[in-house]
Image: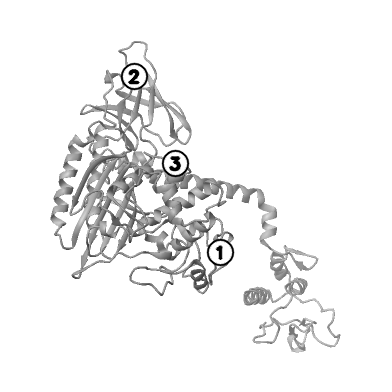
Amino acid sequence: MEEDDETRDKLLTSVVHMMESNGTAHPHPHPHQDSKTNPAFHFTNGDMTMSESNKNFNNNGVHKPRKFSLPTGNSYPAKAPLDRMASVASSQFTTANSVLRLVSDDRVDGHTKPKTWFAFCKRKWPWILLYFSVVGIIVALTTMYVLEKRNNDFTATIMKGKEIKEPCFEREYARYIPNVKREAEIIKAIIKSKLLINRQFDGKTTQAYTIKVNYMGKEIWSDKENANFSSKFPIASLTKIFPVLMLHMLIADGTIKSIDDDVTKYEPLFDYKNPFNRKRITFRHLACMMSGLPREAPCLNFTITNFCPISDEEMYKRVRNITLSTHPGHIPAYSNLAFGILGSVLERLKNTTSSQWIMDNIINPLNMTETGFDILERRREFPESIVDGKLVDIVNWGWLTPTGGLYSSSNDLAKLGLLFTGNKTLPGLSKETIQRMLTPEYIWADGEAQGCPFEINKVDTELKKKIDYLVYSKDGSIFGYGAKFSIVRELQLNINVLAAHVDGSTNHIWYDVTKIFVKAFDDLLKRKGDNYRLPANPERFIGSYKLTSYWPIIKSPCNITLEDGMLFLNLEWMKAPLTGTDNPLMLKTGNYQKLVNNHACVLLGLGLLRMEFHFDPAIDANDSLPGFYVNGISFYGYVSFERIK
């Protein structure tokens, strides 16, 4: 509004100046002027009043030039109608009329035309549409160019070896190797492991141990001290593997419909307080440490010979008053109580104890003759463990038996390992079920994971260097004894440790031995595996090739070169070795350890490892090959190149 006032003031000032400069002009009588008054300027609506008396005329009745002044302050309102001002000025002064006409062109019937964006767009929409279309196309093309250039520059930097200084790790898979224990890598691993354990064993902290390493179901190395491989040790939480196997077998036989069923559906006595939401605990939550139940059961009245001498009914009564620490399925939280409930529910479904069912359907079929739940009766067969000068007592687990009540030997744990490495089957358990048990249920931020029931960790095989194998393991720890069962699935490697140890730990033995053998088998399988093969008559492949199909990111010719006895593909940002195959007209990219800066990480990540390059046949067997094609290397699928002559 202030801008309108200012504009109006400026316009009136310019009119006044014109009137002053044209003092001979005679005003026309105002239609409302009284006949007795002299001609005057008068706005009748009260917005503005300007009048002149007879003194403006001389004695001869000739009009005298007048000094015009504009009212100031609030002598007239700010919103004086501009069209009425223009009309009066036009009728009084010809010069002013010509000026006011300039500002009256956008008026219709005395009203101002609305100068809106809509009106402008309505008149100019074709040009506006064209403008924004052109700008949009330019922005889109510029963005595509910048992103593609950035991607190509980054990839080219990697491919030139500026960021990758050594061959990228590629996971190997177990395969039969005759006399594998005589291979140099395995002999070296055995020697290193033995020396390592000898340095750690002092007969006091670790008083007895057994260890076994199996590859594809066959023993590779074993070691012991103050025990033998048939010696029985309490295995504590390793017991948890067996209720989970029982759960899957009951799902397979239809006793339980789904692992995701609400447990209360099968055991109405089981209830608890969930202050977070209405989610219910399922069998999956119990088996995968995701129930939200507290770590320990409210046994309360344990004795020196029984951890938890309590009935199911009494335990469920106590559990009803328990409040969950997290809502079910939220985050892993270790719980012995959860596995006690799992075993209790399963055994009530089969009208027998979970211990007896596991013995009849899992342990005996696997021929695990040195494994059982009668731990008190067999305690004299266990290696002694002395802590603080006292012999450790062996205790029955009572209601918590499904949580940790088993004992076993190295020989028997190796038999269990056959099941998880795929070298033995069990009625009611498919290989797919075993694979599901070796699958992460929850992945932590550091890459470690929780399975059902296994803990999943990466293997460090060298100092400050990760190797991409996952170890599925289960710890067992009780006062004076420790146990470890572990599987490296891809290598079909099973490593088990049992120990009488003051801290109930085996990790000081297991961790380093696992690193040593995983690295040894990885090296051995790589050496025995995908070796580079220079194709016959490699000169036929060497040369420059131009792209003959659509692949817009390729601007330069493709070159195939021979360097240090290896063929290389050089394509824009990619440099990769090309190995021969059984087909004389086909080469493929590969990951070869003897190649320095082979950039296999990028080949793996971009999906280019072991990609096949099919060459067109030449007219003469010794002539250079005319071109080649590749499937799946680009977003557009098929691409082809022909030799530049």
In primary-sequence order, the first of circles 2 and 1 is 1
Q: Which residue does the numbered mark 3 point to in the structure image?
A: 431
In primary-sequence order, the first of circles 3 and 1 is 1
Q: Is residue 594 above or below residue 643?
A: below
SS class, disc 2: loop
Q: Which label sits on residue 584?
A: 2
Check the picture and name the quadrant holding the C terminus: top left
SS class, disc 3: helix
What residue type is disc 2 on? Pro
Q: CA distance from mark 3 to mark 1?
A: 31 Å
Q: Which residue does the numbered mark 1 point to in the structure image?
A: 279
State the image coordinates of residue 29 (x, y, percent, origin top left).
82, 78
Mark 3 vs mark 1: give the one in front. Answer: 3
What residue type is disc 3 on? Lys
Taking 156 as reference, is 27 left or right? right
Q: CA distance from mark 2 to mark 1?
A: 62 Å
SS class, disc 1: loop
Q: Is residue 439 visible?
A: no
When asked about the image quadrant of residue 337, the answer is bottom left
State the image coordinates of residue 222 (x, y, percent, origin top left).
22, 45
Mark 2, residues whose alpha carbon is within 10 Å: few (<14), some, or many (≥20)? few
Q: Nearer the viewer, residue 575 or 86?
A: 575
